[in-house]
Image (spheres, rainbow, N blue to C red):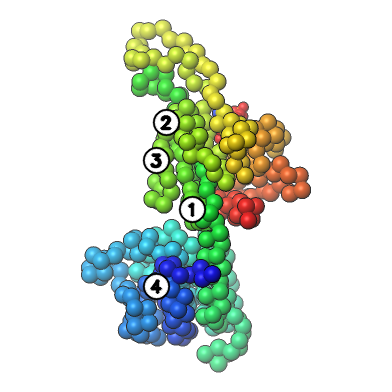
Amino acid sequence: MNNINNKKILLIICGGISAYKSLEVIRLLKKKGAIIKTILTKSAKEFVTPLSVSSLSQEKVYDDLFNAENEAEMDHISLSRWSDLILVAPTTANTISKLSVGSCDDLASTVILASNKDIFLAPAMNVRMWEHTSTKENLNKLKKYGYKIIGPDIGDMACGEFGEGKMTEPNEIIKKIETYFLNFNKNKKFKALVTAGPTYEYIDPVRFITNKSSGKQGYELAKALSIKGFETTLISGPTNLKISNDINLIQVETTEEMFKSTQNNLPVDVAIFSAAVADFKIKEKKKDKIKKKDFINLNLEKNIDILNYVSTHNSLRPKLVIGFAAETNRIEENSRKKLMEKNCDWIIANDVSNKSIGFDSDFNEVTILYKNKKIKDEKIYMKKKSEIATKIVDRIVDQLN
Ligand code: CTP
């Protein structure tokens, strides 16, 4: 089966001698039925012409961030949203350096920074440039940010030297893209559900009890699942976060609403319960606003445990049930207890006592605890929540496949 057929690929060509090979990349992708839009950087135009690129791709070639005609037709944000994948071939040392600091002074770097898709880089440069410590450090940063690196290869270079730095051959680049879409298509048959954010429990029409959850980790998990091809539903308590349209977002306020929405969106293959659900609700919510002069005494009752309900009802139970454990002390011990009590397959232990990670932070540090004793627990040290999400989703993909 051809997994590239009809896939939308945004090819960015940077200015290096191997830019001529990117014409062959276009030809091979085209042969497989891909739809290719191309961006040429300013220096790429010294090596290949927009005319040769557009003749091969049969699509418009973009080159200038401040081109009113291009922006009117498809602005830089739409261009990055349009694609299923971005390929930068060749990627020069200069582009690697720019991306490592998030610089965006031209159309190519702006589209990359604005992208919500997986980005493949195929570096090509002289061997000394490739081996330079600054290039290595920049590249390590890019790997951490989630860029996927193809090559470079070892061999004779256009500059006459020999070593590592040659752009990977076009047919090898195509194979990598093919594998990527093969995995993507495999995951497309999977449905995922994520709960995220806090819940509100109303005392009266204007007051409620809630907690500090920002929902960031859950949103990043939903994004990572969607990028990997999962049909994803995100059931979210109130947050300030945004999510792309390819995710089915259901916004709720109370635990009861989160529970009902969860039930309505089963069955799924994997469910991740990252919401910080209010454990208690008000026994008798007041219909009218409580006045200052009123004497109030809040009577609380337990809320339903959504995770526990889903994981213990066999007819509803997803193949993979993943809970979160927000703990401030004896993190692993308490989390393992939750793993067993709530009948989860995995639990993600989260230390919420540390202010620089967890609640409301962009960073997190977690341990994945597995019910299956044969799999070793896995600590993921402090990382951006997006990177933590990618790692967790990689494990989910391995498990389901
Ligand atoms: N959870 C849920 N429904 C609830 C409470 C919790 O689905 N009513 C889920 C959370 O989304 C999380 C897991 O259960 O995946 C553990 O939540 P946590 O707040 O850490 O623990 P609690 O069960 O609330 O227990 P405790 O507050 O005593 O630590």
Left or right: where does residue 124 sit relative to residue 381? left
- Single out the mark in the foreground, 3 or 4: 4
Q: CA distance from mark 1 to mark 4?
A: 22 Å
Secondary structure type for disc 4: strand
Q: Position of residue 325 (x, y in %)?
A: 61, 36
Secondary structure type for disc 2: loop
Q: Position of residue 115 (x, y in %)?
A: 41, 60
Disc 4 residue type (three-letter): Ile
Secondary structure type for disc 1: helix
Question: Which of these two is toward me, 363 or 270?
Answer: 270
Circle 1 residues within 10 Å: few <14, some 14–19, many ≥20:
many
Question: Which residue does the numbered mark 4 point to in the structure image?
Answer: 36
User: Ligand 1 quadrant?
Assistant: top right
Disc 2 residue type (three-letter): Glu
Q: CA distance from mark 3 to mark 4?
A: 35 Å
Which of marks 4 and 1 precedes in the sequence?
4
Q: Residue furthest right?
A: 374
Which of marks 4 and 3 precedes in the sequence?
4
Q: CA distance from mark 2 to mark 3?
A: 13 Å
Disc 3 residue type (three-letter): Asn
Q: Quadrant of the C terminus?
A: bottom right
Question: Which residue does the numbered mark 2 point to in the structure image?
Answer: 253
- Single out the mark in the foreground, 1 or 2: 1
Question: Which residue does the numbered mark 3 point to in the structure image?
Answer: 240
In the image, the residue with mark 2 has its CB under 8 Å from the nearest atom of ligand 1: no
Left or right: where does residue 288 sit relative to residue 324? left
Is residue 221 something that shows in the picture?
Answer: no
Residue at (58% x, 52% y) in the render: 393
Is residue 87 something that shows in the picture?
Answer: yes
